[in-house]
Amino acid sequence: MLNRIMTAHRQMDAACEKVGGQINIMEVCGTHTVSIFRNGIRPTLPRRLKLLSGPGCPVCVTDQGFIDVMLELAQHDDCIIATYGDMVRVPGRAGSLETNHLSNVKVVLSSDDALKLAEKHPDKTVVFIAVGFETTTPATAVAVGEADRKGIENFCVLSGHKLVIPAMRALLSDANNKIDAFLCPGHVSVIIGSEAYGEIVSEFARPCVVAGFEPMQIIEGLAEICRQIVRGTAQVGSVYQGVVSAAGNTTARKIVAEYFEPYDGYWRGLGTIAGGTLRLKDKYKRFDALERFGIEEIPAEELAGCLCGKVLSGLIDPPECGMFENKCTPDTPVGPCMVSSEGACAAWYKYGRIRKRRS
Amino acid sequence: MVQIRQDTKAAVVNQREDKKILLAHGGGGRLTSNLISSLILPRFDNEVLGKLTDSAAIELSSSSVLFTTDSFVVKPLFFKGGDIGKLSVCGTVNDLAVAGAKPVALSLSLIIEEGFETALLERILDSAANTAAEAGVRIVTGDTKVVEKGSADGIFINTAGIGTRVAGAELSFDKITPGDCIIINGTIGDHGMAIMSKREGIEFELSIESDCACLADLTCKILESTPGVRFMRDPTRGGVAAVLNEIAEGRRCDIEINEKPVPVNPAVKAAADMLGFDLLDIANEGKVLIVASQDSAEAVLNICRNHPLGRQGQVIGRVAETAAEAPIVEMITAIGGKRIVRTPYGRDLPRIC
């Protein structure tokens, strides 16, 4: 392992040498962010190679309006809110699912569990809080399909599903962006395939390299990016071969396309992203929680004072937000980046506190 | 002589009449005595309990007595490697053990929800009795209450325990000295992940078993033969991360942990990765963190490795003088990086993907 680390570091040093200034690589995915911190990768990197945590934490990019709609639905006595664990603690305008002490909130591990809840409680409407990127959307689509097929009409989804490529495009379209290359998510790439990043590479000339979540895979992914920088090229690369194919999982994508369609949805901190969010197609609208409860649209809102948006865009590191570690901690989170275990702020707080030396 | 109040207003189950616990079983009437004679006494038979006095009278060999209590509300009640009965005995035995005591006697109190199945109660009692017998600890007093359906979740157990101090075992934060070694007796996170995988209904390819075990035999052996032990604590809720931070804050010292030697069961690691958990934050029920002087670390490790509960024992870190405003726990990661280790928030929620 030591040899592989040293070889990787030589590549990184060479790239820093060639560029002369700072190299900013964004890890898009929250799982990468956590692994980078948990394995202490940052301190081992050359000083001029900077990692930016991107918008790939599903909870973090879910906007305030969505959270408020979720909290509002949780007030309905005849509803059961079925949600992934991370969403329970995200604060809205009126507390969170956790602090509101609601007995009708059930943490589930999959959309299938939510569907089972609906079957078990025919007198209640189960609202599945459907968030996540391409990795979780196929399962939501399958659940809607099952509900349709079996006639489980007391099941619906509040969709906040998001797409990675439109977000990357939006980040690079911002003139202030500092991103030189992307470390692309392993799990999402299993579904979308590595060739999905081709459009980013050709349009914006930024290296896109897919990596797994083990520390060595991350280090070698960064080294591959640096190799491209030294060569002066920008390509789609993968150090996660054998797991991620060029074409991805076409079956999963077909299922998603049957039930969902992209629209211009609001992302926390990033604003409206063209074709970045998924909603149920008209054919399946009766399973859409918004339709079911007569909510016209999810209002676009931002929490005042929270700099999660700038963190998600890689414009600042969490400690640069005035609330970090003061007003905003994992015990009293203000923004979602501090709530989700995959959020950049939570990872910085948990693993990366800057050591204050005695003066 | 120590007097312990013994309240035996026990619920009674006559299996021929009913297979479930009823509110009436907590009434203290005829059924109560049936329960004691048919379910409790045969399992925990010892002459102190058998007297059914209001308080248990026991003789102790030392005047330095340690006393602790703990309540158990685990869900699920049965999991791979243990159940609430075994856990309720191990938990209190271990609290005594890591404080430097040889456990002597336990109380066992049950709060049962009306309608709880008698067969399950019997399994739980069997398990508690077997665990206590294996650990050489007597259950000398107890109590049973039945509460209305919905007022409890199946069964809750409280145990309290007393033990006598192992000669010379004066363990405290104050004894910890920079340069001391931190030793663990085996793999981390097994119990928490076993519970979590059962609770979440996840079937892992490799099965995960709780490490639930009574540590007193191991800790007594260590304390009796090694003078250099400064402090011990069992990393239960909050895991190794919480205990290391308690030590750092309690002694105002830094701690440096090495990730490489930290023993980990690969299946447990895979499960934790999948759910997004850090194994340092996950509960253990058969592990002890031992702070020992550098000179005695090897002896401690040898005793561990020659004991069934310490075969995978390792020195995982050391204590250092703090150089920062606030004491800090740091980890040298397997790839040679560095990161801090914080006390976890307290509620582990599985992540989205």
Image (cartoon, coloured by chain):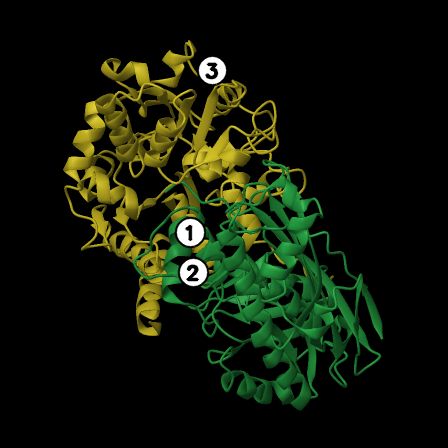
Chain A is which colour? yellow
- Marked residue nearer the N-terminal end (2 or 1): 2
Chain given the colour green: B
The residue sitting at 39% across, 18% down in the picture is A289
Asked if residue A238 is positioned above or below residue B309 in the image, the reply reads above
- Residue type, label 2: Lys
Label 3 vs label 1: CA separation? 39 Å
Horizontal side of A314 relative to B112 (left or right) equals left
Residue closer to the observer: A284 or A206? A284
Output the chain of dot 1. Answer: B
Label 2 vs label 1: CA separation? 8 Å
Q: Secondary structure at mark 3?
A: loop
- To the question of a shared chain for discs 3 and 2, the answer is no
**Label 2: few (<14), some or many (≥20) within 10 Å?**
some
Placement of the N terminus of chain A among the 4 image quadrants: bottom left
**Label 3 close to label 2 by CB (< 8 Å):** no
Q: Which mark is residue B80?
A: 2
| Quarter of image, res B193 | bottom left
- Residue type, label 3: Pro
Decide if residue B19 is in sight here.
Answer: yes
Residue assigned mark 3: A299
**Whole-percent x, y for residue B269 in the image:** 40, 61
Placement of the C terminus of chain A among the 4 image quadrants: bottom right
